[in-house]
Structures are given as C-alpha cells and as structure tokens.
Amino acid sequence: MKEYRLKTVEELESEGVAPEVSVFLPVFNEEANIEPLSLRLTESLQQLGRTYEIIYVDDGSTDNSLERLRAAAARDSRVRVIALRRNYGQTAAMSAGIDRARGQILIPMDADLQNDPADIARLIEKLDEGYDVVSGWRNHRKDRWLTRRFPSTLANRLISRLSGVELHDYGCSLKAYRRHVLADVKLYGEMHRFIPIYAGWAGARVTEIPVSHHARNAGKSKYGLSRTIKVIFDLITIKFMSSYLTKPLYVFGSAGLLCLVASFLSAALALYYRFVEGIHLNRMPLATLAMIMFAMGIQFIFMGLLAEMIVRTYHESQDKPTYLIRELINIESESDGTGEL
C-alpha cells in the first residue's frame, strides 16, 4: 500500500509550486538597508513554516541599491527583483509588486527597516482568524511629531470620517491581504494607503493590529508635509470614484443647476431694482453675476456630459500599466500587458 505524506516547504519550493506568502517592498535609494533588511526578513519568513517569496521593486534608485538587490537574488532564488526604468513613486512600485506576486497572502512593507519583519507572523495569524485585510498600526511611532506624526494623525481621522472604514494608521505600509482583495485593484497617485478602504467598500473584513516601528538608522526619509496634501487630494478622488464613477453627471449637473438657480435669482433681483427701485443695471453687480453664473451652469452641465463619455471609454478601454520595467531578476518574462521590458 502506497504511503502518502505532506511535502515539506523545501520540497514544494524545489518543485516551483507557487508560494503561500508574497512579501513585496518598494526600494528607492536604500543601499545601506538592503543587507540587514534581507537577513532579518529571511529569518522571519523561514520561521513561518510556509513557502514564500520576497519581491523587491527598485523604483529608479540612483545609488547602489539595485546592485545590492542583484546580489541578494543571486544568493536566494526566492528573492525576486523588479527594476523600474525611473522613479515612479511608491504607489506604482507597489503595483508592480502586486502584479508579479504569486502568493495567496500578499504583504507590502517598507525597505527602510522601520517596519519590523517579525510582525509578519502576527499579521498572518490575524488573517487566519477570518479577516481579508490586516493593517499595521504604528501606535508608538518613531518619527518627528510636527512634520510626520501630527499631520498623519489629522489625515487618518479625516480619512476614517469620510470613508467609514475606521483605522488608526492608513500610512503604515506593513499590511496583510488575501490575494482576491487585490485582484482588480488599480493604484494611482498615493492611493496604495487606501486599499483597506476599497476592500471595506467591497465587503471585505478589515481589521488592524499594533506593530513595531523603529527609527530610521540609515538613508533619508522620502516623505514630508507635502505628502499629506497629496493624500487629501487622493481622498477626494477616491470618494468621487466610489460614489460617482459611473454617474459623474450627478455631480457636475447638480453644480450646474445650482449655478443656474443663482443666475435666475440674481437676474430677477436685478430686474426688481431696475423697474421698481429705478437703479440702472450698469450700476449693479447683480446683472454681471447673473451672466457669470448662467455661463458656469451651462459649462458644468456640458462638463458632466463629457465626463459621462469619458467614463464609458474608461470602462471599455484596454488595461494599461502605470509603470515600465527595465529588468526582471528570477522572474519569467511575460507578454501579458503588465509592463514593457
């Protein structure tokens, strides 16, 4: 009688079976952090008892980061590297990692060693409780209060209020996702931090756990106050996209109707002053205001109609990437439209 047994993690990896866990990290000018990060990350993932892969996305680094990543990939076939042609930003780099990840559990994190790889096991344990998204919460954040923590706190409260998804820390890159949550997500701007919102709106179970946060010991931070402003603009965008993506005329048309109402009221008031009070129109701003509001109302309505046409084109157009790839290491070349080699 033939004896059956479960294959070990090492045997599954040697047979090229898709890994259970994919960790992907955007990298931009982090040469001093690559070696210690690689060691700590590999040590933490080996303790999981699951098959895994590590995907580094070099986002157009101008230092020796890519060379360090090539060396790491040469030492370990589970390390995969995507080198983008230029610096596209963290969101596009994360998109590249998501597109090439093969695991059923996807974990993004920063490459600056401020996220702790040891927290990955805790994120997966929480995911195994039945959640679809587990977000990290840096409740003891090691960043400057005025330029990083304070604006981040305000932004997080605003995001939770507008989105209805209650999280303390949207900016923490360390999260765990089930693969199906990210299957159809397309990211632009700084929108990678809003993935839990997309998931929550789609009915996914979202939670968060406290994670460790370390002070940066090497390299320079790429974030500042300007990023908070970008996040607010992106929040407005996703609110519009979630509520009015398929019906933009509702927004522009409503604004147009308000302008037309204001125009008619201004015109009526101007006529009253002209014929009842005897004040000439050229001495009143109401007539000018009526004409301006009327023009704006018509313009808003036509903008809404144009947006309706664009939306239809958007839904029917081909899928196009937000990044271009220069080089792939330990990754098979694919002609699937997800990038250009």
Image (cartoon, grey):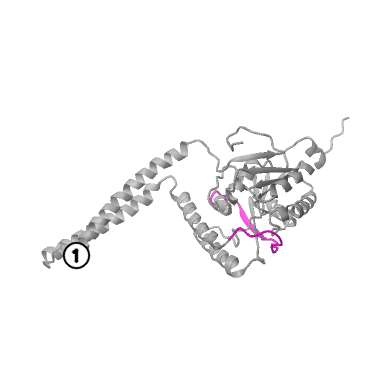
Horizontal side of residue 277 vs 43, given as left or right: left
Write down the region rendered in magenta. Answer: 199-223
For the residue pair 279 and 51, the one nearer the viewer reads as 279
- For label 1, the SS is loop
Q: Position of residue 334 (x, y in %)?
A: 64, 33
* Residue at x 21%, y 62% (from the top left corner): 286
Extreme residue toward the bottom, this view: 146
- Say if residue 7 shows up in the picture: no
Label 1 crowd bin: few (<14), some (14–19), many (20+), radius 10 Å:
few
Horizontal side of residue 98 vs 255, given as left or right: right
* Residue at x 73%, y 48% (from the top left corner): 68
Q: The C terminus appears in which quarter of the rendering?
A: top right
Q: Position of residue 315 (x, y in %)?
A: 47, 39
Name the quadrant containing residue 32: bottom right
For the residue pair 307 and 321, the one nearer the viewer reads as 321
Q: Position of residue 187 (x, y in %)?
A: 55, 47
* Residue at x 60%, y 66% (from the top left corner): 149
Question: Any magenta on residue 156?
Answer: no
For the residue pair 282 and 204, the one nearer the viewer reads as 282
Q: The N terminus appears in which quarter of the rendering?
A: top right
Question: Any magenta on residue 210?
Answer: yes
* Mark 1: amino acid: Met
Extreme residue toward the front, this view: 63
Q: How would you classify the magenta stretch by its main secondary structure?
A: loop
- According to the image, label 1 marks what residue? 284
- Say if residue 340 shows up in the picture: yes
Extreme residue toward the right, this view: 1
Compared to 3, does 83 lie above or below?
below
